[in-house]
Image: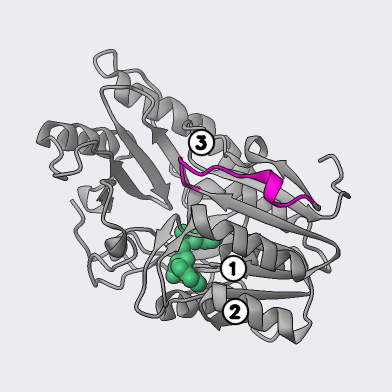
Amino acid sequence: MNKFPLPQQQPLEPPLFLPQIADGEDKSSPFKNRIRKNYRHLRKWAKRTHTDCFRIYDRDIKEYPVAIDFYANYFLVHYFSYNHETDEIPAELVQEVESAITSIFQANADSIFARTRIRRKMTEQYEKIAEEKEFLYVHEYGVKFKVNLHDYLDTGLFLDHRETRQFIAKQASNKRVLNLFAYTSSFSVHAAIQGASYTKSVDLSNTYTAWSKDNFALNNLSLKNNEIVRADCLKFLDDEIRSGTKYDIIIIDPPTLSRSKKMDQLFDIQQDYIFLLQRSCKLLSKEGVIFFSTNSRKFSFDESLFPSCSIQEITKKTIPLDFHNQKIHRAWQIKSGKQLDEI
Ligand SMILES: C[S@@+](CC[C@H](N)C(=O)[O-])C[C@H]1O[C@@H](n2cnc3c(N)ncnc32)[C@H](O)[C@@H]1O
């Protein structure tokens, strides 16, 4: 598992990787059959939309509690463990998963990577897990992204927000867009491709701000109209309000919890969403809209704290077809004032 080196992909014009798979049913393996069925269905959609990164199995069968993501002919398997003390995964399960992938896709075992989705202590969340520095290049609705299946807990592209990115980007033409907690700036890159007049992406991490620059470059987008700022979003918001700048679209998709040496205090979505939304409202243009989202299962949105805002949950529109767990994230559209149009 997880062996490199990867064959070198060309970063500038990466081809779309969507292998054909053989027909057939394996009566002895409902797991293989499900992966095959999911992939065949998704491949048609993926070809049509020029996308080669998506989830091909999402804990569909109880006995196989894994999720498998396909990234341009590479596979990332998430093993879910419910025991907080250990990340031991049964060897037979690993073997069955690998055997299913290699036989269905005629894939090499070296193309399979794994993550254990145990609940890590929050200080570990964004730490590096290796240092191979090998990147892949994938497409999402024709937009290119650099991903890494090896070195970090996350890959550089959160697949569950594919439709959220598309939904927002479609509204971004000629708009000024602010992307808070931008990570590798995938929301901003999609918005810029769809004609946003200006994007600003804010993240605390040097690694991810550098990665963001690569994602813009990969899509031939100039950084002149697409600014990338390394800052603590909580401090950044006050500075930005003082500057008098306004935005038509503000994206807020923060971590659930985060602590960094660069931040004065712990970030906790359940506490800090109030500050984030109240401050962000002050940066909205007259017809502006905030897209707010969280992966926190426990999150509770107290709409009564924002009496002058129109708030609409849009989660049903943002969960992608390949994610069978409907609780992967929640998303809201928020307008300052009561002018929210039906969408
Ligand atoms: C879950 S990711 C956000 C996902 C991202 N919105 C996307 O579109 O893929 C969390 C990101 O928040 C950043 N971060 C955490 N605390 C921050 C803070 N106080 N200010 C700015 N960025 C922060 C991390 O560096 C990381 O890139």
From the viewer's perspective, is residue 95 above or below residue 31?
Answer: below
Secondary structure under badge 2? helix
**Which circle's residue, 1 or 2, is located before the other in the chain?**
1
Labelled pair 3, 2 in contact (Cβ < 8 Å): no
Give the CA distance from mark 1 to mark 2.
Answer: 9 Å
Residue range in magenta is 295-307
Question: Which residue lies at the image location 24% right of the left edge and 64% below the top edge?
Answer: 129
Q: Which disc is residue 236 wearing?
A: 2
Whole-percent x, y for residue 239 in the image = 65, 83
Labelled pair 1, 2 in contact (Cβ < 8 Å): yes
**Which residue corresponds to mark 1?**
180
Secondary structure under badge 1? strand
Whole-percent x, y for residue 323 in the image = 49, 36
Give the CA distance from mark 3 to mark 2.
Answer: 35 Å
Question: Image quarter for residue 216?
Answer: bottom right
- Is 23 on the left or on the right of 52, as rendered? left
Question: Which residue lies at the image location 59% right of the left edge and 68% below the top edge?
Answer: 180
> Quick one: label 1, few (<14), some, or many (20+) residues within 10 Å?
many
**Which residue corresponds to mark 3?**
322
Magenta highlight: main SS: loop
